[in-house]
C-alpha cells in the first residue's frame, strides 16, 4: 500500500511535468493575466510540496538504512547535481547574466544558513525547554546541542570557502571588479574541488563519528551499525524514489521559475523576488528533511543536510560556472555587493559552533534572514 502511494505521488508529478512540457499549458499561462498565473503557481506549488515531502521521507529512510552521513549525502548530491544543471543550462541558453551564479549561490546560502538553520535551532531550543520543565532533575548540561567536532569542520570549511569565493573577488587588483583573472580562477577551482573531496573522504571514513548524533555514536561504539539495513525499506528503492521525485520537483520548479518571473513583471514586484522564490523551491526537500530530523531530536542530522548542501554549492558550483564562462566567453562576477558582504559576515559570526543550543542563535539567524529578504526585495 505504501509503495502504491509513493508511486502515485511520483506519477502525479510526472503527469504535471508532461502537461507543462508537451501540452502548451505553460505557454498559455505565460500569456495569461496575473490572476491565472498566480492560480497556476498555487497548484504547481502544492504538487511541489507533495513531491518534496516524499523526497524528505525517502531521504530519511536512506539515513536510517545506511547510517550517517551516507543518508544525507544522497540528498545533498541529488540536489547539487540538479542545481548545477539548472545554472549551467541558464548560462548557456539564457541571456547573459554575469551575476547569475553569485546570486544563486548567495540565495541558497542565506536560505539554508539563516532561514532553515535558524528555524531548526529554534525548534531544538523549544524542545530543550520542554524537557527542563517536565524533568526537574535535568540541568543546563542536558540541553541539546550539535556534535562539536563535526560542526567545527563544517564551520571552518564554509566560512573559508564563502569568503574566498564571495568576498575576496571584490579586492582583486588583477581583474575587473568582482572577478578573478584566469590563473586565480584555475587555482580557486582546484582548491574548491580538492577541499570538498578531502572533506567527503574524511566524512565517510576516519572522521565519520564527527557527523553523528550522540545516540548514533553510542551504537557505533557498541559495535552496532547505526540504522542497519532495513529490509522493509530497501535502500535501492528509497534511493530510486528520492532521485526520481527530486528530478521531477526541480524540473517543475524550472517551469515555475518562468511563471514566477512573468508574475513578478505583471505585478511590478522587485525582480530579485523571482530568484529567491526559485531557490526556495529547490531547497524545499532539504528544508523538510532537516525540520523532520530536528523535531525527532536529531539536530546533527539536520545540520549535515543544510551545511553539507551549502558546502557542496560553494565548492562545486564555482568551478562549474567558471569553466562554462570560459567556454562560452561569458563574464562571471563572484563578488557580493557591500550590504551582502556584511550580512554574510554576520551570518558566519552567528553560526560559530556552540556546545548547547540556547535559542538566541536561531532567533538572530531568523532576524538576519528577514533583513536579507527585505534588502533584496525593497
Image (cartoon, rainbow, N blue to C red):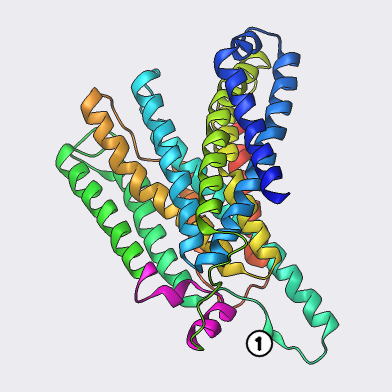
Residue, far bottom: 137
On screen, residue 308 above or below 327:
below
Front-most of residues 172 and 330: 330
The image quarter in which residue 130 lies: bottom right
Percent x, y for residue 122? 70, 63
Q: Which residue is labeled 1 in the image?
A: 141
Question: Is residue 89 in view?
Answer: yes
Would residue 296 appear left or right of 281 to someone viewing this image? right
Percent x, y for residue 355? 56, 78
Q: What residue span does the magenta drawing correspond to?
A: 203-221
Residue found 38% across the figure and 48% down from its top:
314
The image quarter in which residue 359 lies: bottom right
Q: How many marks?
A: 1
Would residue 100 appear left or right of 251 to someone viewing this image? left
Magenta span contains residue 218: yes
On screen, residue 163 above or below 325:
below
On screen, residue 204 above or below 275:
below
Front-most of residues 250 and 181: 250
Front-most of residues 273 and 283: 283
Percent x, y for residue 346? 51, 56
Front-most of residues 89 and 341: 89
Q: Main secondary structure of the magenta part?
A: helix
Residue found 56% across the figure and 23% down from its top:
255
Q: How crowded is mark 1: few (under 14 residues within 10 Å), some or many (20 or more)?
A: few
Residue found 71% across the figure and 70% down from its top:
125
On screen, residue 300 above or below 162:
below
Circle 1 SS class: helix
Magenta span contains residue 173: no
Percent x, y for residue 243? 51, 44
Amino acid at each position: 500500500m505504501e509503495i502504491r502511494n509513493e508511486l502515485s505521488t511520483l506519477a502525479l508529478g510526472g503527469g504535471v511535468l508532461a502537461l507543462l512540457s508537451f501540452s502548451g499549458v505553460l505557454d498559455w499561462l505565460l500569456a495569461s493575466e496575473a490572476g491565472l498565473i498566480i492560480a497556476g503557481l498555487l497548484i504547481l506549488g502544492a504538487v511541489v510540496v507533495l513531491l518534496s515531502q516524499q523526497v524528505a521521507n525517502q531521504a530519511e529512510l536512506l539515513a536510517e538504512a545506511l547510517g550517517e552521513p551516507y543518508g544525507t549525502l544522497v540528498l545533498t548530491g541529488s540536489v547539487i547535481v540538479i542545481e548545477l544543471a539548472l545554472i549551467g543550462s541558464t548560462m548557456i541558453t539564457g541571456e547573459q547574466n554575469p551575476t547569475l551564479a553569485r546570486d544563486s549561490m548567495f540565495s541558497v546560502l542565506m536560505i539554508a544558513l539563516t532561514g532553515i538553520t535558524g528555524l531548526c535551532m529554534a525548534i531544538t531550543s523549544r524542545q530543550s525547554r520542554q524537557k527542563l520543565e517536565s524533568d526537574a532533575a535535568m540541568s543546563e548540561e542536558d540541553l541539546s546541542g550539535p556534535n562539536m567536532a563535526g560542526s567545527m569542520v563544517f564551520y571552518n570549511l564554509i566560512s573559508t570557502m564563502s569568503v574566498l569565493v564571495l568576498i575576496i573577488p571584490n579586492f582583486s587588483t588583477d581583474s575587473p571588479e568582482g572577478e578573478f583573472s584566469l590563473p586565480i580562477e584555475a587555482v580557486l577551482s582546484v582548491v574548491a574541488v580538492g577541499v570538498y573531496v578531502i572533506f567527503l573522504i574524511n566524512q565517510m571514513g576516519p572522521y565519520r563519528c564527527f557527523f553523528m548524533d550522540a545516540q548514533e555514536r553510542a551504537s557505533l561504539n557498541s559495535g552496532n551499525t547505526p540504522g542497519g539495513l532495513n529490509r522493509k525499506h530497501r535502500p535501492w528503492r528509497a534511493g530510486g524514489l528520492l532521485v526520481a521525485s527530486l528530478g521531477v520537483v526541480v524540473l517543475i520548479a524550472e517551469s515555475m521559475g518562468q511563471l514566477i518571473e512573468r508574475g513578478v513583471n505583471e505585478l511590478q514586484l522587485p525582480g530579485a523576488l523571482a530568484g529567491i522564490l526559485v531557490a526556495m523551491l529547490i531547497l524545499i526537500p532539504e528544508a523538510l528533511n532537516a525540520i523532520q530530523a530536528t523535531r525527532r531530536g536529531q539536530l546533527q542530522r539536520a545540520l549535515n543536510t543544510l551545511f553539507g548542501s551549502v558546502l557542496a554549492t560553494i565548492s562545486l558550483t564555482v568551478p562549474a560556472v567558471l569553466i562554462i564562462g570560459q567556454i562560452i566567453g561569458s563574464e562571471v562576477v563572484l563578488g557580493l555587493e557591500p550590504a551582502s558582504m556584511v550580512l554574510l559576515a554576520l551570518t558566519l559570526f552567528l553560526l560559530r559552533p556552540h556546545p548547547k543550543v540556547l535559542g538566541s542563535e536561531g532567533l538572530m539567524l531568523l532576524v538576519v534572514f528577514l533583513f536579507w529578504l527585505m534588502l533584496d526585495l525593497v
